[in-house]
Amino acid sequence: MKNNAGVKTLNYTGYFVLTLGIIHVLYIFFDSGNMFKNIDAETKSVFLFMFIATSIATMFSGALTICFSKIISNALNEIQFAVLLNLVFIVLIGSLAIIFMDDNPFSYLIFIAGAPYYIGYLKIKKGVNGSKAILS
């Protein structure tokens, strides 16, 4: 079976999103002093949980995207909904991050990651509808 540009785009996007999640969680070790400077203990724990939850969710989404790109074949219709849900997650979390944290570069990076994901998704969907072989 031939390689497909859409599958490759999804694969690269998955690695990009996974890397963003890893960088996000590693940031705690490099700048946690500044993050927690002026907040009380209870707020600190909530903030830390949300920070780590965002990192884990982002890493999960990236890993899921990589998995999708590895298993996609002519039977894309079977997993198409899951691929679409993951795309919605990336775009939604990026959009909300920009709204609530417009000074955070991570917000823009995760939002931007939705563009190549969507392009890859459309290319794969077009390939399936055109009965082309798709496998990475």
Image (spheres, rainbow, N blue to C red):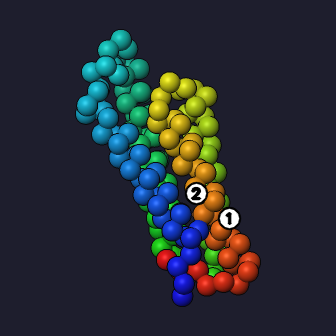
- Which label belongs to residue 68? none
Q: Residue at the spot x=67%, y=76% of the render?
A: 127
- Which label belongs to residue 122? 1
**Helix, strand or loop under label 2:** helix
Image-based side of 94 in relation to 18, left or right = right
Q: Residue at the spot x=51%, y=35% of the render?
A: 107
Q: Position of residue 33 (x, y in %)?
A: 27, 21
Q: Position of residue 130 (x, y in %)?
A: 73, 80
Q: Which residue is mark 2?
A: 117
| Nearer the observer, 43 or 32 | 32
**Helix, strand or loop under label 1:** helix
Hey, what amino acid is under mark 1?
Leu
Hey, what amino acid is under mark 2?
Tyr
Image-based side of 38 in relation to 5, left or right = left
Q: Position of residue 12 (x, y in %)?
A: 47, 61
Q: Residue at the spot x=38%, y=50% of the render?
A: 19
